[in-house]
Image: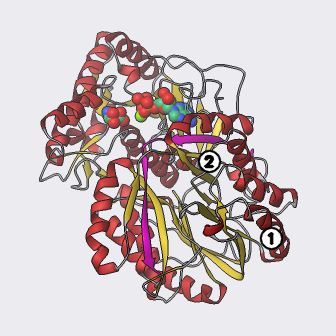
Amino acid sequence: MALIVQKYGGTSVGSVERIQSVAQRVVKTAQAGNGLVVVVSAMGKTTDGLVKLAHEISTSPNRREMDMLLSTGEQQSIALLSMAIQELGQPAISMTGAQVGIVTEAEHTRARILSIETDRLQRHLQDGRVVVVAGFQGISSLIDLEITTLGRGGSDTSAVALAAALQADCCEIYTDVPGILTTDPRLVPDAQLMSEITSDEMLELASLGAKVLHPRAVEIARNYGVTLVVRSSWTEDPGTKVVSPIPQPRPLEGLEIAQPVDAVEFDTDQAKVALLRVPDRPGIAARLFGEIATQDLDVDLIIQSIHEGNSNDIAFTVTQNSLNRAEAVAAAIAPALRNQIDPLAGEAEVMVDRRMAKVSIVGAGMIGRPGVAAQMFSTLAEAGVNIEMISTSEVQVSCAIDQDDCDRAIAALCQAFNVTRSPAKSIGGHRWQQADQLAPPVRGAALDLKQARLAIRHVPDRPGLASRIFSLLADRNISVDMIIQSQRCRLVNGIATRDIAFTVAALDADEAQAILQAAAPELGYGEIMVDRSIAKVSIVGTGMVGRPGVAARMFEALSKEQINIQMIATSEIKVSCLVAETEGTRALQVIHAAFELSGNERIVVPA
Ligand code: ADP
Ligand code: ASP
Ligand code: MG
């Protein structure tokens, strides 16, 4: 007898008929002799409706009351599904998060799971009942019994956490699409189903806007080695398997807040090329990286900063023995950009840095915990290490630094995060390189329309300032992405300054702006600018590591459509571009096509 956790999303239980059809699948699985825990979301758009009601009463509803309200959606659907299962002659019982004993942090509306009591569940299972558990909710402690919720989309996380706690054989996520697709089929109808995806790739896609899985659910599956499958509620097709490496054993106590960082990695074979003051119009990045790709040079980090006036800076890193050729490409392009820009803006210029290193912290436990990146920045600042470039992903934060600082940086980080330096990546080697030569360069693409861009003008160029800024945001639990500091220094009142830009969830933008504004007098920077009309398009794939030309192909696709790239940020397995909000969907479509991700079948998503 296998123990299976099945989760059904809102659309899958959106009507009486759909609840009855879910009940049929549940009964079939149970009667095949399996132990079964079923997690359900609220029916259809119930949670959205409740959020709307709350906002009709208050512009910023009390977070405790919000949890009290939102948790009711799932309470309806567990009761109805239990009834439907019972109607088919199968014993079943519904349980709220509190009744199960899903204990979370006391952080209302975004709680993380700390532990799950399994005794009661086990007793019901042993008595032959299907247990139907409310997703998305928990309680703050077994004494306080405060109802908490896990954040929107959190039922996936409930399901995978239950599977980990029960050591279930499998966790099946049933939803309204056939599985995980190359992109959102609502935006690109010829998106294609994947039979498998690695948990690293799925973590990135999920956090870059693919809401088919909650990123924290993927994190738990990866940490505990849960067998995870995403399938359609309407068919018997096998769906998509999310593949995780065999994990180190971990305690179940502190489930979602286990050690955030597993390793400190480094790469001392890096050099930086920066192309300064390039015009802010479509096609520049495409041209630069297109040339780089024809030279077969593999680019690692790429950043493009916000435009100051009407010009951008683009910086990228390559291995040291590629530097001369990369520099030559940039130098050949620079003159062509000269006369096209406003003469007052200055001339395009190439700057190189021969001896760079990259240090990274790695671990799936840093998702949604902005304090971890902030701690990295402050650790480096305290060790007197200046950060030249930052690249963030869901499972990694990397900083490009001076090579002479590398040993000091590694020692400080290992101590701060209580890990040993990783032997996997000594000089130049990527931890992905061996595993994924067979993978396609790009596995999937995602669009995130729920982001805003913040830019801080004229931040004094002193070590430790970036760390202060991101700690302020982390203290309020605001996650940032695409952190970019301008390559150029500008003198303001005799002090060298740089601009820093980054993206946050649109919902956090006002708060982030207010926090930063309040600290401006103390930290000495200028204006804080917020742009909400942006979209982030991203490509993800472990196969892009060590394959030149992937980023160039993305930039070229956007350039052909005359879509201007406002900001670029990469990590090892993703490239993200910020574009105007109005161009987001078209950008996703052309990128999806450029990587030939389309299938022959059109995916129709039921209403
Ligand atoms: P559920 O209610 O079942 O949790 P969600 O609406 O949260 O369902 O997630 C499923 C939706 O995710 C799909 O209907 C689809 O529009 C969207 N989606 C976005 N990106 C992807 C992707 N790469 N693969 C599949 N679905 C995706
Ligand atoms: N009902 C919750 C939401 O809509 C949780 C979920 O569906 O996963 O966000
Ligand atoms: Mg969902």
The residue lying at 66 percent from left, 66 percent from top is 343
User: Mark 1 — residue?
Assistant: 331
Lateral position of residue 46 relative to residue 278, left or right: left
Q: CA distance from mark 1 to mark 2?
A: 22 Å
Q: Secondary structure at mark 2?
A: loop
Identify the residue at the far front of this view.
343
Lateral position of residue 457 relative to residue 564, left or right: left
Question: Which amino acid lies under the numbered mark 1 shown in the image of this protein?
Answer: Ala
* Quadrant containing the C terminus in the rendered view: top left
Q: Are marks 1 and 2 in contact (CB under 8 Å)?
A: no
The residue lying toward the viewer, choosing from 401 and 34, is 401
Q: Secondary structure at mark 1?
A: helix
Q: How many marks?
A: 2
Q: Which residues are magenta?
A: 440-461
Magenta-drawn stretch, dominant element (helix, strand or loop)? strand
Within the image, what quadrant is residue 378 found in?
A: bottom left
On the image, the x and y values in percent for residue 441 come to 74, 47
Identify the residue at the far right of this view.
295
